[in-house]
Image: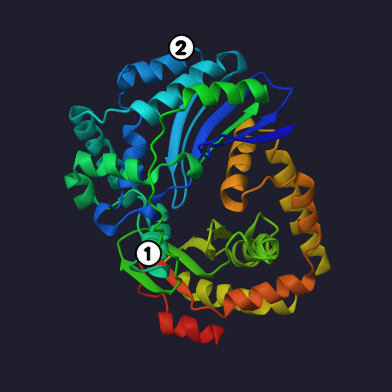
Amino acid sequence: MRKFSKLDNGLRIFTHFMPAVESVTFGVFNDVGSRDEDESINGTAHFLEHMAFKGTKTKSAFQIMQTIEKVGGYINAYTSEEITAYWVKLLAEDLNTGIEIISDILQNSIFEEKELERERGVILQEIGMYLDDPGQMVGDYWQRTAFPNQPIGRLILGKKEIIQSIEREKIVNFMKNNYNPSKMVVSAAGKIDHDKFVEKISNSMKNLPNGKSQDRISASYVGGEYREDKKLEQVHLVLGFKGLDYHSDDFHALGIYSAIMGAGGSSRLFQEIREKRGLVYSIYAGMDSFSDGGTFQVVAGTGKNEIKELLPVLCDELINSPKNLSTEEIEKSKAQLKASTLMSIESTRTNAVVGAYQLIRYGKLIDIKERIEKINNVTKESIEKVAKKILTSNPTVASIGPVTNLESIDKIKSRFN
């Protein structure tokens, strides 16, 4: 059973009662992310997320972790382009412990200089780890190329030079200016009583930051190329296009198209490029959506010589796809999406995340039956239409590795014209 309440300060509270489990996942989800940063403080949203665990007025960083782990729980956080979340998973009987900790870090973090300097080093190590992983970095370079000179295209972790020098005051001010109860959803799923939870949250979260900043810069897809010739075993490649925001009427049609092209071993790209031609170990397609935009991507890794064959075959598969969709593969992909949707609700964490995201994105809860119905209602014609629309946008190509045999961006563009 799902329930929703709203406090006078605008804080929204969601619960999903799951009687068959003994645990609860509880978190605070903020409609704030890296795209809310000014360029001069890129990486601050993520830095702030790290610092929230590094001590409050009453607890040290060690005590925060110890309090949760002492009851066998787990605590973590994450930052994306649009969301920052702080969450815990623990036994239902220990829920108050989780509420105490999350409430404390959101209202009483002290951002001690010594801890800040230590965490600065941790984040620099995290950035270094990403820079050493071309499979990760090619996606970030793709995003930067697709959305140049705007917040949504910047690295969530931030630039090294900014993280190395950013002052405590700017991190504190980001929280004060951007965190606000009306931009937050408190979400919990598992063995939980809604009314008792609402009362506890109402009493525990009376002093949340009250920032007023609403100046999120709209996403503007541009496209282009990032190419880095590097001595590696593989060329790491992302080819993509302008996608859809999550409000689009064609959102589910694009999801089914993505599944047809690159979800699983029976998908078109996997069958043609790996199974028939042996050009890759891994290839997949996917979509990512934001409040005001989105992307469709194909991700692959291949050899220096194999890239000469892979790229033309990949482009041909995409170009021809809207012309020859079969009922069988459409129904298979619908089944994949429905199964993943239904299986995901067995997880307390997924239910907590889904409820929070629905309230942040749509301002309402969407029943799972409605989600399944929208998948069922997608037609062959709507998939063809969205595929054609996506593929007529300016392509974005990012590559890292031995790229000398990768054809030019102009040649790639000409294939789609």
Q: Where 65 sits versus 276, above or below? A: above
- Note whether residue 129 is visible: no
Disc 1 marks which residue? 144
| Residue 289: percent from left, percent from top | 55, 59
Q: Where 120 sits versus 133, above or below? A: above
- Residue in the image at 40% along x and 24% along y: 104
- Note whether residue 207 is visible: yes
Which circle marks residue 256 in the picture? none
**Residue type (three-letter) at the residue carrying disc 1:** Arg
Viewer-proximal residue among 335 and 407: 335
Q: Secondary structure at mark 2?
A: loop
Q: Where 181 sits versus 403, above or below? A: above
In which quadrant of the rendered view does residue 396 lie? bottom left
Q: Is residue 334 left or right of residue 298?
A: right
Q: Where 283 sits versus 192, above or below? A: below
Q: Secondary structure at mark 1?
A: helix
Viewer-proximal residue among 23 and 270: 23
How far apart are the two marked residues, 1 and 2, measured between alpha carbons? 42 Å
Pointer 1 or 2: first along the chain: 2
- Residue in the image at 71% along x and 47% along y: 366
Residue reaching furthest to the front: 8
Viewer-proximal residue among 10 and 340: 10
- Residue in the image at 42% along x and 63% along y: 143
Give the quadrant of the C terminus: bottom right
What is the crowding at mark 2: few (fewer than 14 residues within 10 Å), some, or many (at least 20)?
few
| Residue 164: percent from left, percent from top | 18, 45
Which circle marks residue 70 in the picture? 2
| Residue 361: percent from left, percent from top | 58, 52
**Residue type (three-letter) at the residue carrying disc 2:** Lys
How many badges with numbers are in the image? 2
| Residue 139: percent from left, percent from top | 43, 59
